[in-house]
Amino acid sequence: MEQSLPYDNRIDSESSDQVVNPWEVSAKDGGKIDYDKLIDKFGCKRLDESLIDRVERLTGRQPHKFLRRGVFFAHRDFNEILDAYESGERFYLYTGRGPSSEALHLGHLIPFMFTKYLQEAFKVPLVIQLTDDEKFMWKNLTVEESERLARENARDIIACGFDVTKTFIFSDFDHVGGAFYKNMVKVSKCVTLNKAKGIFGFSGEDHIGKLSFPAVQAAPSFPSSFPHLFPGMDKLRCLIPCAIDQDPYFRMTRDVAPRLGYSKPALIESSFFPALQGENGKMSASDPNSAIYVTDTAKDIKNKINKAKSGGHQFSEDQHNLGADLEVPNSLFCFLPLLCYS
């Protein structure tokens, strides 16, 4: 039974020991993100070995390292996507990027690298949403700057190597309208103000643009938003690879989908690429020193790695005499499951 959408499903209250929402990810007092707690609070399911084995059997290829190593660790109805695929039904992929920086960092690449694998393994189409409108509303950016960042980020996304014959990349400023806008309006009509406050924590100080945006992110979950891609295929299922902080958007989407005559979008959700300062947060475009960008030079990367949280002492003499503080987690070790092939 799908969880309803009460206020208590949010994990970003001041009394909580961690903050996880679409705009902030952090654990208090230097702690780690508790993913078991996220699964319990959000109401998604743990991605187990039986599903990973099914992926291998259905695709005839080894599951991606992000599956084998638990980087993608939670899901909503991924089993139903596999059931449908096994019975001969098609589906499409939907993922996205909120362009707030000049380039992608390693954390941004995780869902795109995994989505590329899914596209190749299942041979399915993909839509990629660039939410330049969202960043205009949440950040101190002009419309023109948001559009420029979307174009810059699109270059990095294209470089991931998606199948150009099966991939549609769009920015909201350019694409919203027509059938897409109709679905936005339908979603908006199904979500009350109280429900939006409960899911996202909006307050009386937030402008109405923020309240309207969740419907924009929901719309690509429905195939009729793309009549030029999926004509007459309104029952086509959607699978969304994303980080788990995006789950609130799609809990809302799944809640309204049946009322609009659509299948609930399925999700496969990842953990966060840890910040260089430690596992109590994620790499963030808001803090350039927390992240390694695809445009960083070798010198930039070396400097950032040398400053990463490692348990080492500030002075070489202390390091020689005392050794590393093993009580302090080495943030660089967290990169190994994400970057190493063997």
Image (spheres, rainbow, N blue to C red):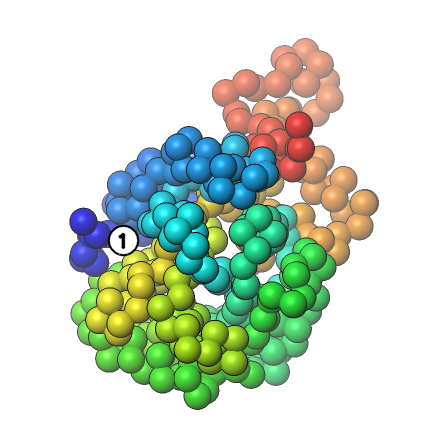
Q: Is residue 133 visible?
A: no
Q: Among all residues in the image, which is located at the extreme bottom? A: 178
Along the line of sight, the residue nearer the viewer: 14 or 79: 79
Residue at horizontal 49 percent and vertical 37 percent from the top: 57
Give SS at disc 1: loop
Residue at horizontal 61 percent and vertical 78 percent from the top: 147
Placement of 129 over or under 283, stated as above or below: below
Q: Report the label total.
A: 1
Along the line of sight, the residue nearer the viewer: 68 or 199: 68
Along the line of sight, the residue nearer the viewer: 94 or 210: 94
Placement of 219 over or under 45, stated as above or below: below
- Rendered-image quadrant of the C terminus: top right
Corner quadrant of residue 275 = top right
Residue at horizontal 39 percent and vertical 51 percent from the top: 87
Label 1: few (<14), some (14–19) or many (≥20) C-alpha neighbours in 10 Å: many
Please indicate whether residue 111 sits to the left or right of residue 192 in the image: right
Along the line of sight, the residue nearer the viewer: 202 or 83: 83
Residue 52 coordinates in the image, percent (x, y): 46, 36
Q: Identify the residue under disc 1.
A: 10
Q: Among all residues in the image, which is located at the extreme top? A: 321
Q: Is residue 145 visible?
A: yes
Please indicate whether residue 120 sits to the left or right of residue 133 in the image: right
> In the image, what residue type sits under mark 1?
Arg
Residue 211 coordinates in the image, percent (x, y): 32, 75
Q: Among all residues in the image, which is located at the extreme front? A: 88
Residue 13 coordinates in the image, percent (x, y): 27, 51
Residue at horizontal 26 percent and vertical 46 percent from the top: 43
Placement of 195 over or under 83, stated as above or below: below
Residue 190 coordinates in the image, percent (x, y): 22, 75
